[in-house]
Image (tube, rainbow, N blue to C red):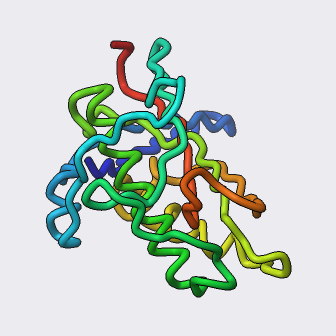
Amino acid sequence: MTRKLFQLTVCLSVLSYSVCIFASTNMTSDNIQKKLENKHLSLPAVVAPIANYVPYVVSGNMVYISGQLPIENAKVKFVGKVGHDFSTEQGREAAKLCVLNILAQLQAAIGDLNKVKRVVKITGFVNAAADYIEQPKVMNGASDLLVELFGEQGKHARSAVGVQSLPLNAAVEVEAIFEINEAL
């Protein structure tokens, strides 16, 4: 859901005193599913955890999504190291695919992606060659997609970390925290 902030500011001047009243409201114009379709993207099937953890936790109006790999058709699509086996641009695509898996888990958790109030934070792990230093550029693949889908509410805090290895030798793993409009 795209949220547009409509603002109204009214200022009154009386006897050299100024009083300003500011009001704002969030209005919706599109939904997330439509934006995905317009980008020729779809959410993959939800992937079961590969170890002893849950794919998401809902606590109040916060949703924590466990790290998601770049899985497509039940297989890791990007296996290997960014900077050795994959270019930065391919790493960006892997991070974008991780976000699609995150959104699939989020939809499973809350039922409707239009309930997202804000993308709070994402953390990206890049399986990187020893001399690779472009982890932030790789993670832009994830960040850019979230902002394209959620607008201003998609802007988030972020960490981008280079690591020696990842589960299943995936090139990228991304985890996320979302705030939703109402507690479930």
Could you say where residue 177 lies in the image, as x and y percent from the top left? 54, 36
Could you say where residue 36 lies in the image, as x and y percent from the top left? 22, 61
Question: Which residue in the rendered view is the most extreme toward the right?
Answer: 131
Q: Quadrant of residue 131?
A: bottom right
Above/below status of 175 relative to 131: above
Would residue 72 be visible to someone looking at this image?
A: yes
101 or 8, nearer to the observer = 101
Q: What's the residue at 67%, 35% (across, down)?
A: 17
85 or 91, nearer to the observer = 85
Would residue 26 be visible to someone looking at this image?
A: no
Q: If the image is split into quadrants, where does the C terminus sit? A: top left
4 or 8, nearer to the observer = 4
In the figure, is residue 50 to the left or right of 29?
A: right
Could you say where residue 13 lies in the image, as x and y percent from the top left? 57, 40
Could you say where residue 158 lies in the image, as x and y percent from the top left? 67, 52
Q: What's the residue at 64%, 34% (across, down)?
A: 15
